[in-house]
Image (cartoon, grey):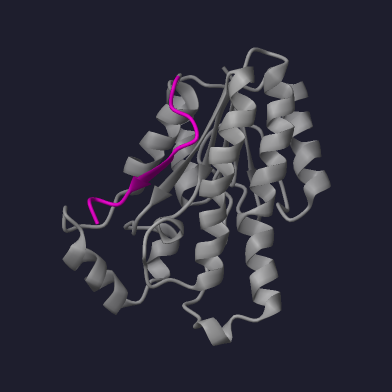
Amino acid sequence: MTAIVLGGSGTVGREVCRMLAARGVPLGYTYHTNANAGIDAPSKQLDVTDVAAIERTIDEFARELGPIHSLVNCAAAGAAHLSLDEIDERAWDAMIAVNTKPSFFAVRRAAHHMRQHGGGSIVLLGSIDGVKTMPSPVHYAASKGALAAMVTAMAKELGPDNIRINSVAPGLLERGLSSSVPDDLRNEYLKHCGLKRLGRVEEVAGLVTWLATENTFVSGQTVVVDGGL
């Protein structure tokens, strides 16, 4: 089993890489600026807004590591809490260019390789903002909500090739992009969360890793990890 993690040096991606490595899974990961994922594995710098670079990088990993069985996309951009009237066209396009468009082209290229070797599993990192009513920037919520729609459609098309695809949608976490959430919104989250705490990165990464390596029948789902909001 071989895995590729896009955004492998980010908060969640780094933990996914660590868990995959601990399971003995050969993997490669990409990064944007920070090259260190804390593991001994091949890495490549990648601008995920460059579709040709995405496809080339996946092809290179396939040549270097062997058949691809798992693809995880953790590459993402956060957003300041802008109001509807504050989001201009440039901000909208930039968010979609990082959080939505790359997943489509990465999945398509990885699926091309997986079809040749009996299938595989794909996991996209979404967000609770895209599936539940939350006070979040509209362009960010739209960019993440699109992933949920993508996996439902892709599951039907990729299923006959034994390719599973799912999205994991975390709520607020102790680390990572959640750190930029204003205190009042964080307090509201804790007030309504059933478990009365923020999530741990390891909890999200553990689910992502299971879906990427052990899952054999879950497909087309967006699994929300929010502590019972």
**Magenta stretch: includes residue 108:** no
Q: Is residue 14 above or below residue 91?
A: above
Q: Is residue 204 left or right of residue 36?
A: left
Instruction: Please name the residue shown 68% across and 28% down the image.
Output: 111
Look at the magenta stretch and give its main secondary structure: loop
Kindly identify the residue that appears in the image at 55 percent across and 47 percent down. Answer: 149
In this view of the protein, which residue sits in the foreground, 139 or 56? 139
Is 228 colored magenta in this rendering? yes
- Residue 136 vertical position relative to residue 152 in the rendered view, above or below: below
Q: Quadrant of the N terminus?
A: top right
Single out the residue that lies furthest toward the top: 118
Q: From the image, which quarter does the C terminus lie in?
A: bottom left
Q: Position of 134 compared to 160: left or right?
A: left
Residue 217, percent from left and from top? 44, 21
Quadrant hosting residue 210: top left
Between 149 and 107, the one lying in front of the other is: 149
Magenta region: which residues?
217-229
Q: Quadrant of residue 136?
A: bottom left
- Residue at image coords 30%, 49%: 200
| Residue under the point 74% across and 26% down | 112
Quadrant position of residue 184: bottom left
Q: Is residue 66 above or below residue 35?
A: above
Q: In front: 85, or 189? A: 85
Determine the residue located farthest toward the bottom in the rendered image. 85
Q: Is residue 221 visible?
A: yes
Residue 65 appears in the figure: no
